[in-house]
Amino acid sequence: MDARRAHQLRPVIFLNTVPKSGTNLLNQLLLGIPGSIMNDYVFYEGLAKDLPMQASVLGKAVPNDVYMGHVYYSPEWAKLLVRPGIKTIFMIRDLRDVLVSLTYYIVEKLPDYPIYEQLVALPSQKERYLLLINGLDEYPNIKNWFGVFQGWLSQPGIFITTYEELMTSKASRRRTITAIAEFLWKDSVPPMPLARLVRCMEANIDSSNSFTFRKGVVGGWRNEFDDEVIAAFKRVAGDVLIRTGYEKDMDWS
């Protein structure tokens, strides 16, 4: 295959994540692919009213483009993101750690967030966790907040990974990056030998170069939750942890 044909077969990459699940980490990995370019447009929500405009943006994508977003699952979006030439990666994280990261992020950096005032008015981080776990009349509980993304976990044709697979160990990270690279170039030719490509992707990780990165700790919720918060989380979203593989049952603390 000549170089021009190989270039044409390079995929458009769509990075879709649950918020606070390691978006910037995966973004850096993908931008470690030689020639990849991050598009400035970020896809949020993917509501039906926005679909024509967002589909138009995606329709202009060219090989080597990388897009990222936090797009809710819908059959319409599934059709867009499994089209030939588009490779979609969906990443999740332990929802308990997502909750911790999201809470700090809203309070410290998102004054325009819908329930910012309610959160900062609370006297403790514990009470903020409980608010986000239980939700408000005008804001979903943590289970429903995650639920709009859940359909991606059973969507054929996309690559599903977790934050933990990239952070637990060097060996786990290398295996996961290799699997991502194999998925991206399953139907085409990588720009260099796969092992070298994986090294380039891994070398591009820089957690200090991220506005949204705080600690990135795996299992950090254990240092944040007391018994009351744990009980509330189990009651509202314990089944989510089982469905996503983070717990086998409700017997955790």
Image (cartoon, rainbow, N blue to C red):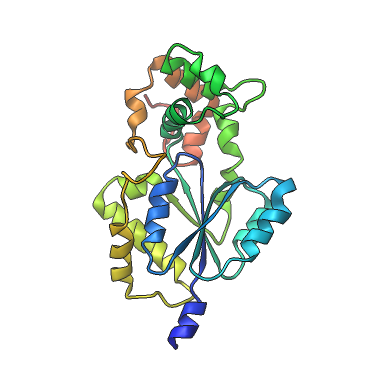
- Identify the residue at horizontal 32%, vertical 75% (top origin): 193
Q: Give the quadrant of the N terminus.
A: bottom left
Towards the viewer: 64 or 229: 64
Pick whichever, 104 or 76, lies toward us: 104
The answer to whether residue 158 is above or below residue 130 is below
Q: Is residue 48 left or right of residue 61?
A: right
Q: Is residue 246 left or right of residue 39?
A: left
Question: At 53% from the left edge and 24% from the top edge, which residue is drawn?
Answer: 132
Above-or-below relation of 16 to 230 = below
- The x, y position of residue 84, in whole percent, is 59, 70
Q: Quadrant of residue 138?
A: top right
The front one of 43 and 183 is 43
Q: Position of residue 116 (x, y in %)?
A: 54, 23
Residue furthest to the top? 123
**Residue 178 location (% of width, % of height):** 35, 63
Count of marks overlaid on the render: 0
